[in-house]
């Protein structure tokens, strides 16, 4: 499954993803559709490289789905 093929529904919550630029992994906790920019944003909870808990919004093209 790719980010582009994922339906934006309840099934998106809890999907494990990798942040492409850093390699950190986390779980999708929320999503947002932005009509003006025509983009999808995903809130990801993850463990940062320094060990602290983190959450940030990422654009769809910044994430890669980790196969179950």
Image (tube, rainbow, N blue to C red):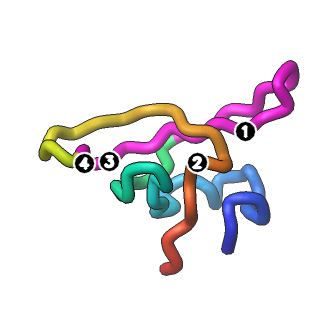
Q: Name the residue under label 4.
A: 47
Q: Main secondary structure of the magenta part?
A: strand
Inter-mark Cα distance, 3 to 4: 4 Å
User: Image quarter for residue 5?
Assistant: bottom right
Under circle 2, the secondary element is helix
Dot 3 or dot 1, earlier in sequence: 1
Which residues lie in the magenta part? 30-48
User: Image quarter for residue 50?
Assistant: top left
Inter-mark Cα distance, 2 to 1: 11 Å
User: Nearest the camera: 10 or 20?
Assistant: 20
Residue at image x 48%, y 44%?
29
Dot 1 or dot 4, earlier in sequence: 1
Q: Mark 1 points at which residue?
A: 40
37 horizontally vs 64: left or right: right
User: Image quarter for residue 6?
Assistant: bottom right
Q: Residues within 10 Å of mark 2 (few under 14, many from 20)?
A: some
Under circle 1, the secondary element is strand
Q: Mark 3 points at which residue?
A: 46
Marks 3 and 4: CB-CB under 8 Å?
A: yes
Farthest bottom residue? 68
Horizontal and vertical percent position of residue 19: 46, 52
Q: Residues within 10 Å of mark 4 (few under 14, many from 20)?
A: some
Marks 3 and 1: CB-CB under 8 Å?
A: no
């Amino acid at each position: 499954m790719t980010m582009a093929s994922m339906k934006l529904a309840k099934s998106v919550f809890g999907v494990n993803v990798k942040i492409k630029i850093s390699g950190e992994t986390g779980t999708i906790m929320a999503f947002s559709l932005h009509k003006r920019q025509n983009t999808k944003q995903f809130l990801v909870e993850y463990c940062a490289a320094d060990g602290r808990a983190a959450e940030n919004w990422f654009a769809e093209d910044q994430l890669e789905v980790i196969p179950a």
